[in-house]
């Protein structure tokens, strides 16, 4: 403000902050190191399955059952390269599904949502994987992201858009990386059975169209959330058999030999594992460590709620509060930016490491992502 009595008239703030939200959001970790924000214990609202042809089913047919190898004497000896490439049916990544499967679930269950009338109108609807990327943003130094946002009947929908760099990388993916991706799914096949109490059958195909997705409700700060996430398996012997606490996330990682390798694993990989499993309340991540030849010879369970302990005293570690505070700040930023309720209007939030999040505005194709079938059915 200007000093009184200096011959000038006191001027009010030129802009109303609410009608003119900031046009960018910084992502520096130091800005988000407050106390851990409120995060509601995630509860499962429902689930759906995608079959080998990527067709939607409103049931749990794709859910698999955790079936680790017997712990008698020697450890496992899983050949993760077995079946590659002959028994690999990779999902077609050119197909842009956006939020479609989640929207189908939502359309079929919108009448039975808990939280009272109007809960959905105040909620944010997205994929768990999109939220994972938001959580890790303050520490990400490699990959940027783009999130498209539309408001419709009050609800804010967030759907990721593949960046040009990510697309270029995907199309130029070296054969060795393609095989590494296969190996991650092959590990799941060695660790899961189709029926509770059954045994894994590693002789079959690895088809990455198949997925079981849990639909969850939570809240971050004052942001009610409805999101879906792929679940690797459920543990029939879990101490708490109620989803999502019976779910198990499976991961592979390089075998480590030096303290420096472990430190780097804690700083980088464990952050991503934590963010992915903390959001849906999945309590354990079971890691298979692979040799350079692609054999998993050891397993280790990482409880999600204990992952931070590995970096708590590390100056170059990550902090769950920073992740969650940034995510909450982004959701507020998005809520304040996307003011118009219009399913054909898209605010595109773009981020590259080293820069703040920026916004651009678009209408209709190619950015609009809420399908006509959804908008029309919701308008009935
Ligand atoms: P890993 O567990 O070895 O990472 P998820 O762990 O989320 O259940 O994913 C299962 C597998 O999908 C991963 O195994 C990896 O092989 C593959 N995958 C997941 N995200 C990927 C990505 N961004 N790029 C390449 N492959 C990915
Ligand atoms: Mg998975
Ligand atoms: Mg997994």
Image: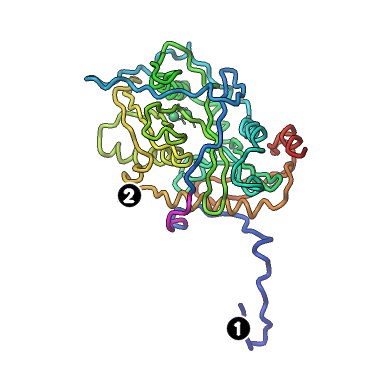
Residue at horizontal 54%, vertical 42%?
A: 217
Identify which residue is drawn at 47% across, 54% down.
Answer: 37
Which one is in front, 244 or 302? 244
Residue 176 makes an appearance in the image: no
Q: Is residue 35 magenta?
A: yes
- Image position, residue 97 (x, y; %): 63, 30
Compared to residue 124, the image places residue 257 above or below, namely above
Counting from the top left corner in percent of width and height, residue 178 is at 47, 22
Q: Position of residue 135 (x, y in %)?
A: 48, 45
Q: Which residues are magenta?
A: 32-39
Q: Secondary structure at mark 2?
A: loop
Say which of 164 and 344 sits in front: 344
* Occupied quadrant, residue 185: top left
Count up the numbered dots: 2
User: Would residue 276 be visible to someone looking at this image?
Assistant: yes
Apparent side of residue 325 relative to residue 313 in the rendered image (left or right):
right
For label 1, the residue is: 3
* Point 55% across, 35% down: residue: 215
Mark 1 vs mark 2: in front: 2
In the image, is residue 266 above or below residue 186?
below
Cα distance between the residues tagged 1 and 2 = 47 Å
Viewport quadrant of the N terminus: bottom right
Q: Nearer the viewer, residue 131 or 174?
A: 131
Tag 1's secondary structure? loop
Locate residue 68 relative to residue 279 in the image: left or right.
left
Ligand 1 within 8 Å, label 1 CB:
no
Question: In this image, 23 relative to 76: left or right?
Answer: right
Specify whether residue 359 is painted magenta: no
User: In the visual, does 78 lie left or right of 121?
Assistant: left
Residue that numbered label 2 is attached to: 312
Q: Position of residue 300 (x, y in %)?
A: 31, 31
Q: Main secondary structure of the magenta part?
A: loop
């Amino acid at each position: 403000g200007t000093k009184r009595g200096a011959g000038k008239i006191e001027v009010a703030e030129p802009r109303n902050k609410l009608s003119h939200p900031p046009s960018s959001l910084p992502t520096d970790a130091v800005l988000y190191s407050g106390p851990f924000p409120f995060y509601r214990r995630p509860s499962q609202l429902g689930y759906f399955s995608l079959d080998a042809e990527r067709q939607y089913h409103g049931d749990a047919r794709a859910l698999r059952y955790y079936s680790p190898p017997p712990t008698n004497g020697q450890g496992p000896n899983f050949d993760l390269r077995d079946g590659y490439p002959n028994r690999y049916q990779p999902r077609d990544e050119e197909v842009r599904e956006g939020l479609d499967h989640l929207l189908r679930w939502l359309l079929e269950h919108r009448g039975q949502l808990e939280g009272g009338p109007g809960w959905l109108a105040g909620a944010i609807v997205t994929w768990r994987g999109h939220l994972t990327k938001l959580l890790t943003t303050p520490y990400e130094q490699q990959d940027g992201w783009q999130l498209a946002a539309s408001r419709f009947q009050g609800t804010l929908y967030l759907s990721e858009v593949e960046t040009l760099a990510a697309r270029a990388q995907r199309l130029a993916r070296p054969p060795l990386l393609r095989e590494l991706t296969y190996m991650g799914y092959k590990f799941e096949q060695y660790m899961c059975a189709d029926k509770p109490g059954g045994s894994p059958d590693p002789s079959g195909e690895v088809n990455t169209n198949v997925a079981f997705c849990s639909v969850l409700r939570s809240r971050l700060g004052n942001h009610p959330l409805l999101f879906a996430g792929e679940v690797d398996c459920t543990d029939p012997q879990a101490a708490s058999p109620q989803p999502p606490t019976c779910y198990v996330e499976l991961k592979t990682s390089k075998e480590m030999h030096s303290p420096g390798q472990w430190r780097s694993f804690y700083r980088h990989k464990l952050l991503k594992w934590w963010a992915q499993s903390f959001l849906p309340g999945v309590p354990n991540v079971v890691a298979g460590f692979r040799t350079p030849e692609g054999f998993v010879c050891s397993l280790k369970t990482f409880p999600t709620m204990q992952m931070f302990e590995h970096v708590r005293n590390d100056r170059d570690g990550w902090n769950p509060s920073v992740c969650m505070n940034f995510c909450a700040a982004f959701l507020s930023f998005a809520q304040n930016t996307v003011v118009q309720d219009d399913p054909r209007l898209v605010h595109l939030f773009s981020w590259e490491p080293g820069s703040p999040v920026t916004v651009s505005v678009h209408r209709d194709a190619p950015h609009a992502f809420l399908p006509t079938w959804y908008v029309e059915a919701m308008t009935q």
